Structure formats: structure tokens, C-alpha cells
Image (cartoon, rainbow, N blue to C red):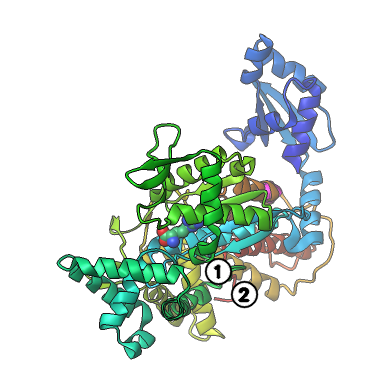
């Protein structure tokens, strides 16, 4: 990687005043490409060395020499570097031709990264927030694998808690087996809402619900059977969404799994003198003026946080992960701060490797997109609509396409996923089918379309995979070479920042750069360079496809 190499060269020339990593973070792209390919600003060093930046830059420029460097200029406090384009071009493209989709992959580290994502609640609709978590978490798992880690994909289902006591009581009073079997989540939600309405005037219902949850916690068989049925039926509904998205998990151990693992945790908190009695409930007092973290209620019942504590300890013993990402909406920020704070107080150093990966809301026409406003907006319907729109597009533009249904699904779903991942995850995102399907916009279909375009060029040109000399590629290819060179670094950055938008933006820039190149260059003109140009665009296609794959999006050859 040229940035890494350059950074170590510069660090050396500076007699290690700065570390390689420090130099690397300082490297930047000059304002325009006529000034150079890479710039190193000397202002930070000027303070440190008490020397004029210009002088540091000149001295540094004297010392820098490498075969990848063509020319060095000092402008103000900057060292501007022109790279040797021919050498670098061959270097990058041969690396891609030799490694194919493994280009940019790190060697296996034999270390686990846990990703806790999707995690919907049983008997409740799969919300837009859960969709975001699913899409972001899936991409992060792929990015972790590309970075050499073993990804452990966990769906921490919301399948435990006092609400299941209410559901059991509601079912016994008003439940209809056939209706629930036909449409589990909708029906279960209906009786759950009814329970709340009725409980407003009938306090005994809440009493019954507490008793029902107690019997569930104690493993009483009838209650357990109902719970299991609610869970299985809900999961079947969730699975249809995972199937459309092409997503799988390594584990569905949700909150219920920790039912028998909380007692030892509470005992440990007690032993470590961390529990305070507050109105009959046990809490852990927090640092930084956070409200206390509730561990057990007055009646001894445990909470969401108690289960997350047990889960963190269990997972540490089971997976010993070097990093854990909790992909959960930013409205749960306080919960995770409290969770990490408690683990810290318990003396667990590994708690520092746990990270909440928050994200913003999904909006429609500028308003929060709710799954339950009057009537339920089913996520499966939203996805189906995207696929239908893609189908209409195909019918209008390419009615003879083979495997239309499959391509429509890949494009429709790709549009939804890309729309989610292209911006910083903290931003709220607007759900507009029209915009996300626009073939010329900053969209998934645009990147997919560019990939399909290259595939058809390769087919027309009878491309044969072979190693070539790329020296005569020409100046229009250069911006693309620079990008391809940056791909491995982009993957690393996406992992470090837990930010799939790094990859999505990269794929957009690469697609745009390719289309610009293609507008300037006749690739299929049967000259002596045709195979070389085809090999070059093939490299672009490999990286576009690999980028989309990491995001969880397919790349059809034709669309
Ligand atoms: N089921 C929760 C919800 O829908 C999300 C769980 C996230 N993961 C966790 N370990 N707390 O709000």
C-alpha cells in the first residue's frame, strides 16, 4: 500500500520524530491533481521542532527517494509528491489480477469479532430501526471478515421480559390459535394492545401477568410452551425478511437464553459491593452523572440491562472477542454507556473492547417512519415495493432480460440497502423509493448498472484473463488507479470506524470514475491495446462487485 510505504519513508527521513501511523494520518490529497498525488503538510511538525514548516518541507524533500516517486515539490509548508504512474499502475493492477476478489483482504488473524445486530422483539413488528441494524450489522460482519477477523453474527432477540407474562395472560383470555398461526405478529400485537387497554381499569390483570412471567422464569411447562410458540411463529415471520435480504446469523441466542445466567451476575455485583438498595430495587450507581443502572426490580424481576450484563460475560467466555459491536439505534446510547460502566466497575478490562454502534432514524417525507401508526406498515411490503419498482424499470428498459425476477429482487433490495449505507450512519435517512432507484443518482442501482456495463464490455470484447503490461494505459486511467490503490486502506478504515459508508462512498466514486474514463476512452476499438484496456476495466469490475458484496448487495451481470 503506497500510503503505508510513503509514511514509513517519511518517518524514517524525519528520524522518527513522528511514528509511521502519525505520518499516515497526516498524508492528504493535494487540492488539485496538478499539484501532485499525495501531500505531506509540515505544520504540526513545525510546532514540535520549532522550525519553519517550509524549511522542514525542503529538508524532507531532499531526503525522500523511492522508485515509486517520480517528482517532489515543496509548496509552502507542503511536500507534494508525484508518484511514478507506470510503476504504480502495474503494481496495483497486477495485485488485483492475481488476488481477484481477495485484493484488499487481510490475512486471517484468528481473532473473533462479535456483531450483535438486527435483534428484533418477539411478537412485535420488525421496525425500520431493526432494518437499519440488520443492514449495517451485516455489512460490518462482512467488513470484519475482509479485515481478517472471524465474524460472530448474533441476533440478540428480544424474547424475554415481563411483556411475555402479559402476552400469556392475554392469550389465555382472548387468544385465537388459528388467527395467530395465520398472521402471528399482527395477532399477538393485537391482544397485547388489548391487554394494555383492559389493564387500565383492571389492576388484577397486571398481577396475573407478573405471576405468569414468574411461572415462565421458573420453567413451568405450559407457560414455556406458549412462549416457545410465540417465539417460533415470530421468527418464521422475521425469516422471510432475512431471506429477502440474504442474511444469516451464527446464533439466535436472545435475552431468554440468559434467564439462568443472571443470578451469578447479581451475586457477583453484590460481592463486589456494587449494588445499592433504592426503594426496594437494586441499582448500580454510575459515574459521570448518569442515572443509576437498574439491576433488579422490587419484586426481584430482572431487566434488559441485567440480561445484557449476563450476555456480555457469557460471550466473553465463549468467544473471547477482540471487539464487539452492538448495532443499535442511538436512542439506546444511555443503556450501553451504563452497561459498559457497570462492566468496568466489575473490573473487566475487556469491557473497553465493547462498542455501541449507533445510527439515526429512517424518515419518510421528513417524518419518522413508524411501523405502527394506525395500521402496521410491514417491512416485507416495503421491500416488495422496491422489487416491484425494479421490475417495472426492467420491463420498460430491457424487457428481454433473462431471469427478470431475480435481477429485480437484486436491484430493488440493493437500492434499499445502499440508500441506508451510503451516508454516515448517524444521519437520519430519507426513504424515497424514487430517489434510491435512480440509475443516475448516488444509488445502489447506479453502481450495479456500472458493473453490468463493464460485464457487457468484457463479453463483447472477448476478454481473456491474462497478465499484461499496463504501461500504455494513459492518463484517464490514473485517477482510477489511485482509487484502486486506496481500496485496502478503505476497508481498514471502514472497520476501524465501524462505518460501512466508507465502502459505499468508495464504490460510488469508483463507478463514477469508470464512467468518466469510458466516456473519454474507446475501450472496444480493436487496437493493439484492447486486451490491456479490457483487463483494466475487469479490475474495476472486480472491486465494484467486491464492494457491493461487503455491503450485502448482489451484482448482476446484466440488468
Ligand atoms: N431488542 C432490542 C430492541 O429492539 C435490541 C437489542 C440490541 N442488543 C442488545 N444486546 N441490547 O430494542
Q: Is residue 187 visible?
A: yes
Q: Quadrant of ligand 1?
A: bottom left
Mark 1 vs mark 2, CA separation in Å: 34 Å
Q: Which residue is rendered at x = 29% and y = 83% of the image? A: 175
Which residue was labeled with disc 2?
557
Q: Which mark is residue 252?
A: 1
Judge whether residue 206 is colored magenta: no
- What span is in magenta? 482-487
Secondary structure mostly taken by the magenta-highlighted segment of the chain? helix
Q: Earlier in the sequence, mark 1 or mark 2?
A: 1
To which quarter of the image does residue 284 belong? top left
| Foreground of the two, 165 or 277 | 277
Asked if residue 270 is positioned above or below residue 74 in the image, the reply reads below
Residue 183 appears at what percent x and percent y?
36, 83
| Foreground of the two, 115 or 500 | 115
Query: Mark 2 falls on what kind of element?
Result: loop
Query: For disc 2, does the CB lie below 8 Å from ligand 1?
Result: no
Q: Nearer the viewer, mark 1 or mark 2?
A: 1
Query: Mark 1 falls on what kind of element?
Result: loop
| Foreground of the two, 62 or 234 | 234
Q: Which residue is rendered at x = 52% and y = 44% of the image? A: 269
Amino acid at each position: 500500500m503506497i500510503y503505508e510505504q510513503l509514511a514509513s519513508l517519511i518517518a524514517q527521513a524525519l528520524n522518527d520524530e513522528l511514528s509511521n501511523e502519525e505520518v499516515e494520518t497526516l498524508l492528504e490529497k493535494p487540492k488539485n491533481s496538478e499539484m501532485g498525488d499525495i501531500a505531506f503538510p509540515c505544520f504540526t511538525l513545525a510546532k514540535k521542532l520549532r522550525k519553519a514548516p517550509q524549511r522542514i518541507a525542503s529538508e524532507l524533500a531532499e531526503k525522500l527517494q523511492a522508485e515509486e516517486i517520480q517528482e517532489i515539490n515543496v509548496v509552502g509548508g507542503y511536500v507534494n509528491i508525484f508518484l511514478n504512474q507506470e510503476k504504480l499502475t502495474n503494481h496495483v493492477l497486477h495485485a488485483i489480477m492475481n488476488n481477484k476478489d481477495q485484493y484488499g483482504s487481510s490475512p486471517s488473524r484468528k481473532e473473533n469479532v462479535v456483531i450483535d445486530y438486527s435483534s428484533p422483539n418477539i411478537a412485535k413488528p420488525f421496525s425500520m430501526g431493526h432494518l437499519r441494524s440488520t443492514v449495517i450489522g451485516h455489512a460490518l460482519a462482512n467488513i470484519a471478515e475482509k479485515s481478517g477477523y472471524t465474524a460472530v453474527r448474533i441476533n440478540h432477540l428480544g424474547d424475554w421480559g415481563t411483556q411475555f407474562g402479559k402476552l400469556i395472560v392475554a392469550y389465555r383470555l382472548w387468544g385465537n390459535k388459528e388467527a395467530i398461526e395465520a398472521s402471528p405478529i399482527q395477532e399477538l400485537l393485537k391482544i397485547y394492545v388489548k391487554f394494555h387497554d383492559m389493564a387500565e381499569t383492571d389492576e388484577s390483570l397486571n398481577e396475573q401477568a407478573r405471576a405468569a412471567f414468574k411461572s415462565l422464569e421458573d420453567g413451568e411447562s405450559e407457560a414455556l410452551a406458549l412462549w416457545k410458540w410465540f417465539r417460533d411463529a415470530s421468527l418464521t415471520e422475521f425469516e422471510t425478511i432475512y431471506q429477502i435480504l440474504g442474511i444469516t446469523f451464527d446464533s439466535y441466542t436472545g435475552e431468554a437464553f440468559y434467564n439462568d445466567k443472571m443470578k451469578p451476575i447479581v451475586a457477583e455485583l453484590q460481592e463486589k459491593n456494587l449494588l445499592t438498595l433504592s426503594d426496594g430495587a437494586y441499582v448500580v450507581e454510575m459515574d459521570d452523572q448518569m442515572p443509576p443502572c437498574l439491576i433488579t426490580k422490587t419484586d426481584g424481576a430482572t431487566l434488559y440491562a441485567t440480561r445484557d450484563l449476563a450476555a456480555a460475560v457469557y460471550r466473553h467466555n465463549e468467544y473471547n472477542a477482540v471487539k464487539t459491536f452492538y448495532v443499535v439505534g442511538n436512542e439506546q446510547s444511555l443503556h450501553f454507556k451504563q452497561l459498559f460502566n457497570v462492566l468496568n466497575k466489575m473490573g473487566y478490562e475487556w469491557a473497553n473492547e465493547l462498542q455501541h454502534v449507533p445510527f439515526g432514524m429512517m424518515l419518510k417525507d421528513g417524518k419518522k417512519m413508524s411501523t405502527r401508526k394506525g395500521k402496521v406498515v410491514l417491512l416485507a411490503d416495503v421491500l416488495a415495493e422496491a422489487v416491484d419498482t425494479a421490475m417495472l424499470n426492467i420491463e420498460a428498459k430491457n424487457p428481454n432480460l433473462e431471469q427478470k425476477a431475480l435481477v429485480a429482487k437484486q436491484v430493488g433490495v440493493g437500492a434499499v440497502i445502499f440508500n441506508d449505507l451510503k451516508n454516515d450512519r448517524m444521519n437520519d435517512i430519507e426513504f424515497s423509493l424514487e430517489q434510491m432507484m435512480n440509475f443516475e443518482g448516488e444509488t445502489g442501482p447506479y453502481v450495479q448498472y456500472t458493473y453490468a456495463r463493464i460485464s457487457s464490455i468484457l463479453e463483447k470484447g472477448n476478454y481473456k484473463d491474462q497478465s499484461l503490461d499496463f504501461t500504455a494505459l494513459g492518463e484517464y486511467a490514473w485517477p482510477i488507479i489511485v482509487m484502486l490503490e486506496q481500496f485496502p486502506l478503505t476497508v481498514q478504515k471502514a472497520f476501524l470506524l465501524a462505518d460501512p459508508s466508507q465502502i459505499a462512498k468508495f464504490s460510488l466514486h469508483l463507478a463514477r470514475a469508470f464512467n468518466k474514463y469510458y466516456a473519454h476512452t474507446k475501450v472496444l476499438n480493436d487496437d493493439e491495446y484492447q486486451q490491456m484496456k479490457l483487463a483494466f476495466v475487469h479490475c474495476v469490475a472486480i472491486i465494484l462487485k467486491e464492494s457491493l458484496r461487503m455491503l450485502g448487495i448482489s451484482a448482476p451481470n446484466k440488468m
